[in-house]
Image (cartoon, rainbow, N blue to C red):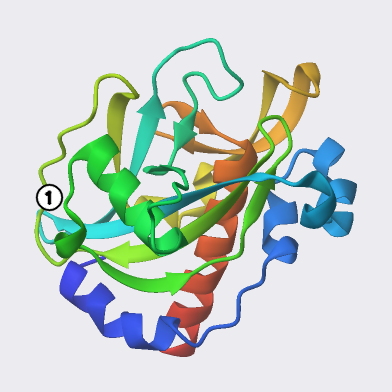
Amino acid sequence: MDFQDFLQYVPNLIPVPLPGVTAHIKMAPKERIQALKNQDFKIENPRIAAVMMLFYPKNENTHLVLIVRNAYKGVHSSQIAFPGGKYETTDADYQETALRETQEEVGIAPEKIKVIKQFSPMYIPPSNFLVHPYLGISKEELVFSPDSREVADIIELPLAVFMDDKIIVEATLSTSYGDNILVPAFDIQNHMVWGATAMILSELREVLQTTFEGNS
C-alpha cells in the first residue's frame, strides 16, 4: 500500500475496538488457548516490557519493521520480535519504554515516531513478561542501525505482504510446550513467526482489516 494512502486511514484506525484475546487465539498454540482465556496477571506478578509496531515508508510503500533476535541461552533466542524491551523505573510510562527500546535496538530516535494507539497486552509464560504493544508511525524513510548485541537482522515487511492471508501457515516447531508441536505461524521472508509476536500481529491485522473495510 502506498504510504500516503495508508496515512489517510490512520485517523479511522484509532477508534477501532481492540479484539484482544479473540484475535490472539487465532495465532496461539493450542496449549496456550485456555490460559489466554483465564489469565490473571496479578497472580503471575509478571515482569513488564513494551514493544513498538512501527510503520514507515520505503520506496513510497508502507512497511512494518521486525527484528531477528540474536542466538543466546534463553527462551527467546533467535526469535522474530518487535523492537522493544524491559520497562525501567526511569521510564515515565510503558510508551516511553517502547520508544526508548526502539532507539536502543534499531537506532530510531523517539522524535521520529508518532505513537498512534496502544494495543492489548500479551502475557508470555516462558519468560513471565507482560508485553504492552504500541502502534507507531514514522513519516520518513528510516535507516536502521541495529544493536549487534541484541539484534541479528532487520526484517522490513511490506504492508501488502502482511495483509495477505497466504503468509498464515501451520509449522512444526520445538517450543516450550514440547518438541515437534504444530503451531499457527506467519511465514515472513523465510522466517516462521509464532508465539507472542504472531498473536500480537494477529490483533494488528484485525484492526487494520476493520479500518480498511470500513473505509473502502
Left or right of 39? Residue 110 is left
Residue 157: tell me if it is visible.
no
Q: Which quadrant is home to the C terminus?
A: bottom left
What is the x, y in percent for residue 162?
A: 42, 52
Q: Residue at x 78, y 22 (%)?
A: 181
Q: Which quadrant is home to the N terminus?
A: bottom left
With respect to residue 108, does 190 lie above or below? Answer: above
Element carrying mark 1: loop
Q: Residue at x 58, y 56 (%)?
A: 202
Mark 1: give few (<14), some (14-19) or many (20+) Cα within 10 Å: few
- The quarter of the displayed image where residue 68 is located: top left
The front one of 126 and 188 is 126
Q: In the displayed image of the protein, which residue is found farthest to the front?
A: 90
Q: Which residue is mark 1?
A: 142
With respect to residue 31, does 52 lie above or below? Answer: below
Q: Residue at x 74, y 37 (%)?
A: 125
